Image: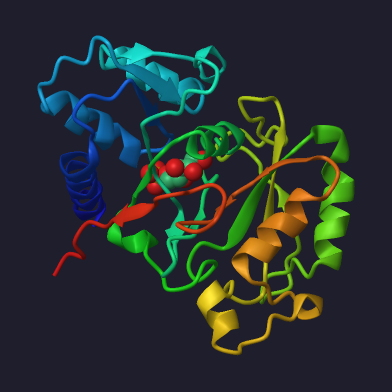
Amino acid sequence: MAVEIETAKRAAAQLAVKNHFPDDPRFVGIGSGTTIVYVVEAIKELGHDLSRVGFVPTGYQSKQLVINAGLVPIEFDALPDGVMVDIAFDGADEVDDELNCIKGGGACLYQEKMVAMRSKEFICVADYRKLQSRLLTKWPTVPIEVEPKAARQVMARLKVLGSKSAAGKGPFLREGAILKAGPIKTDQDFFIVDAPFPEPLLTSADLAGGTVANPVKGVWEVEELARTIKDINGVLAVGLFCGPTGPEARDAAVIGGQRPV
Ligand code: 5RP
């Protein structure tokens, strides 16, 4: 099974780069996670002269990936004023029918969002497991990057917003998988709060079709939930990327690998 998933990730990455890598980009965003490794591999395989292209990483590991591939990294804050990134490639934890994404499974949230919002095109590269008609179907939580001192008050507010899994588990601080040595820290030295909700998130089409969100019961529409969480004091970034009509992902495209038969 593991090999099939890696094959699907690679297939998604190859297709994304083949169909979307621009002819002569100046700046290219490189996201985080395991799928993006295959994107960088596919970019290298193009065989183009990339010496004048600046690759904008979305975190420390993503920067190492760029450097190890022999590509030229450029920090986000070194981008010339007013200049957009031509295209950003990034992975996702779940993608819905409207190309809204959950991101942050790898804790690289804030910089991913900055690069996505500064990009003319955002290409979400995801294998078949990630494609679900509604968010929070298989992926269990909304990741939220939070200033450590505010974490408890953010979690308290999330509970009021109905953050609770179907099994009754509320929002929680993400711990390291191997060392149980307290909450993990992001590249910004912030915490990640994972917020479950009892129902998959509604899309704008659901609302247009007459389905009514019920925040009191924790039933939310994606963009409304993203805005509401972002408004909580202490929240740096919310792992909901709303596209293609939302503010973050202007031109999102999802490339899924094939489900193995
Ligand atoms: C990191 C992310 C990743 O892009 C997301 O978790 C997907 O990762 P992978 O490609 O390993 O499945 O948002 O915070």
Q: As drawn, is 102 to the left or to the right of 17?
A: right
| Quadrant assignment for the C terminus | bottom left
Q: Residue furthest bottom?
A: 210
Above/below status of 204 relative to 141: below
Q: As drawn, is 68 to the left or to the right of 81?
A: left
Rendered residue at 15%/14% (across/down): 49
Q: Position of residue 69 (x, y in %)?
A: 26, 17
Q: 8 or 231, which is in the foreground? A: 231
Rendered residue at 30%/16% (across/down): 53
- Using the rendered view, name the quadrant where residue 128 is placed: bottom left
Q: Position of residue 70 (x, y in %)?
A: 26, 11
Rendered residue at 40%/50% (across/down): 251
Rendered residue at 50%/59% (across/down): 245
Above/below status of 193 relative to 196: above
Above/below status of 212 relative to 229: below
State whether residue 74 appears in this view: yes
State which image quarter holds ligand 1: top left
State whether residue 196 appears in this view: no
| Quadrant assignment for the N terminus | bottom left
Q: Position of residue 113 (x, y in %)?
A: 56, 39
Q: As drawn, is 59 to the left or to the right of 73?
A: right
Q: Position of residue 16 (x, y in %)?
A: 23, 45
- Using the rendered view, name the quadrant where residue 64 is placed: top left
